[in-house]
Image: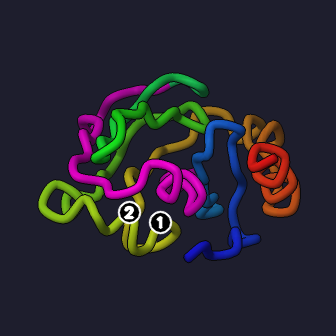
């Protein structure tokens, strides 16, 4: 069951979302569409706290019964927190990709990078294209 893409965040073409907290930090996860394509997620390799990631660089790995996929950093920054709950219950991403299934929190390095990301409407259009 696909959720609509929340409008309070931005999206990458690689199917990650980023929610700007407005204080120089942001929360990152994969979209509902991404978890749907992956099917049942069985393992999440979280990035180490303190790691610096560049926009577009792999920052985590999500493993499903079907495949292993990199999760790319939608923005550059330093990992300041990870969702440890996913180590025990990776299926949270399937159940609540935009909420409890978040992957990491970053301290943003360059807020301007957010401007390069897609709005919920633009991301919705991208998904529609991919499905055809």
* Residue on which the image places disc 1: 97
**Residue at image point 12% right, 61% down:** 88
State how the image is colored: rainbow
> Could you tell me residue 10's position as x and y percent?
72, 55
Task: Depth check: give the residue in front, 54 or 25.
Answer: 54
* Disc 1 + disc 2, Cβ < 8 Å: yes
Mark count: 2
- Name the residue at the front extreme: 132
**Residue at image point 51% right, 33% down:** 72
Is there any visible trace of residue 69 in the rendered image?
Answer: yes
Image quadrant in which the N terminus is located: bottom right
Q: Residues within 10 Å of mark 1 (few under 14, many from 20)?
A: many
Measure the alpha-carbon separation of dots 1 and 2: 4 Å
> Could you tell me residue 43's position as x and y percent?
22, 47
Residue 45 drawn in magenta = yes
Task: Depth check: give the residue in front, 13 or 78.
Answer: 13
Q: Which residues are magenta?
A: 24-53
Badge 2 element: helix
Q: Residues within 10 Å of mark 2 (few under 14, many from 20)?
A: many
**Residue at image point 33% right, 35% down:** 61
Q: Is residue 101 above or below residue 51?
A: below
Task: Depth check: give the residue in front, 41 or 100.
Answer: 41
Going by the image, does 113 lie left or right of 106? Answer: right
* Residue on which the image places disc 2: 93
> Could you tell me residue 93's position as x and y percent?
38, 63
Going by the image, does 73 lie left or right of 87? Answer: right
Task: Depth check: give the residue in front, 47 or 107.
Answer: 47
**Residue at image point 36% right, 36% down:** 67
């Amino acid at each position: 069951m696909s959720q609509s893409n929340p409008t309070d965040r931005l999206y990458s073409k690689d199917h990650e979302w980023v929610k700007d907290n407005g204080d120089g930090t942001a929360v990152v996860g994969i979209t509902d569409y991404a978890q749907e394509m992956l099917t049942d997620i069985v393992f999440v390799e979280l990035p180490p706290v303190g790691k610096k990631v560049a926009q577009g660089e792999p920052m985590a790995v999500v493993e499903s019964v079907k495949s292993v996929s990199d999760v790319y950093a939608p923005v550059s920054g330093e990992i300041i927190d990870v969702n440890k709950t996913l180590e025990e219950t990776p299926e949270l991403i399937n159940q609540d990709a935009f909420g409890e299934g978040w992957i990491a929190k970053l301290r943003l390095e360059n807020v301007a990078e957010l401007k390069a990301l897609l709005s919920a409407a633009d991301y919705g259009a991208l998904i529609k294209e991919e499905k055809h």
